Image (spheres, helix red, strand yellow):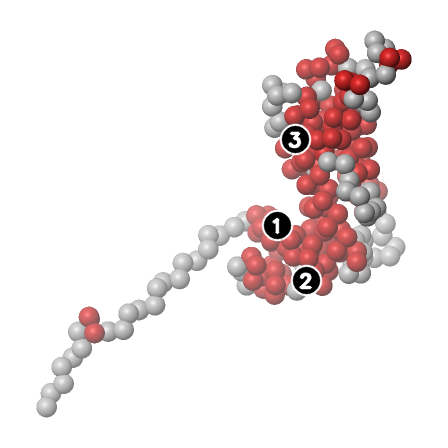
Amino acid sequence: MTTSKPNDTDAAPSAPTRRRAPSMSPEDRRAMIVHTTLPLVAEYGAAVKTSQIAAAAGIGEATIFRVFKDKDELLEACIAEVLRPDNVVEAIRAIPLDISLHERLHEAASAMEAHMDRMGRVLGAVHASGFRSGPRDRGDVSGRPRERDSRVAGIAATRAALAELFAPEQPALRLPADQLAGVLLDLLFARSRRPDADEEPICLASLIGLFLHGAFDHTKLPAEFQGGA
């Protein structure tokens, strides 16, 4: 008996061809890995494993070490990224000036709150797990002044972006826009650092209303304050 040669239709289907991910520059690869790592660091702190990071990023673990010397360098990059004010400054500058000042400041405060919340979660988790940011060589403290300068510059950029939101109302304001932006920043920082308590912190909308209009309900303003400056 002769056996017939199986035709193409009888053959087992071939496995689909695996497509390679598009190539990325080292800078883009670093940015992608940092972006993927940040939520893991917020959850696990410095105890996060590079295998977890690789799985979340959909890359091989070795790829991490092509763009980062070690996990410490990756953690340092995550800390630097979470401290950068670029995203929040861009969000504030994108707020339209044709909406009310209350709406403008509320949007800005919401962007600041999200930025500070992410910063607090990441830094808190990293420090709680025993990792200390900074130069590894005890004799090298050159990085610390740069870090301080970077933070000061970041606050200044955020303050300048906030000040722009006051521009349309400047003639009616009690203080220069830059000073008001600084006061609002202080309020937002104080709110973010408020220790845990049973009562809920004041909501952002109420905080902005208090900032703009003061402590009094103007419909029930005492006579001594009516018509005052």
Which residue in the structure is indicated by mark 3? 107
Direction bottom: furthest residue: 1
Give the vertical position of 211 relative to 141 (above or below): above
What secondary structure is marked by label 2?
Answer: loop
Q: Amino acid at mark 3?
A: Glu
Number of callouts in the render? 3
For marks 1 and 3 on the same chain, the one whose residue lies earlier in the sequence? 1
Cα distance in 3D space between marks 1 and 2: 14 Å
Give the label, 1 or 3, closer to the camera: 3
What's the residue at 40%, 58% (across, down)?
19
Residue 48: image tag = 2
For marks 2 and 3 on the same chain, the one whose residue lies earlier in the sequence? 2
Cα distance in 3D space between marks 1 and 3: 24 Å
Left or right, 97 with respect to 184, comes to left
Whether residue 30 is visible: no
Left or right, 118 with respect to 227, comes to left
Q: Amino acid at mark 1?
A: His
Cα distance in 3D space between marks 2 and 3: 33 Å
Give the quadrant of the C terminus. Answer: top right
Give the quadrant of the N terminus. Answer: bottom left
Estimate the x, y position of residue 99 in percent, counting from the top left.
Answer: 61, 21
Which residue in the structure is indicated by mark 1? 35
Q: Amino acid at mark 2?
A: Val
Estimate the x, y position of residue 30 in percent, counting from the top left.
Answer: 61, 51
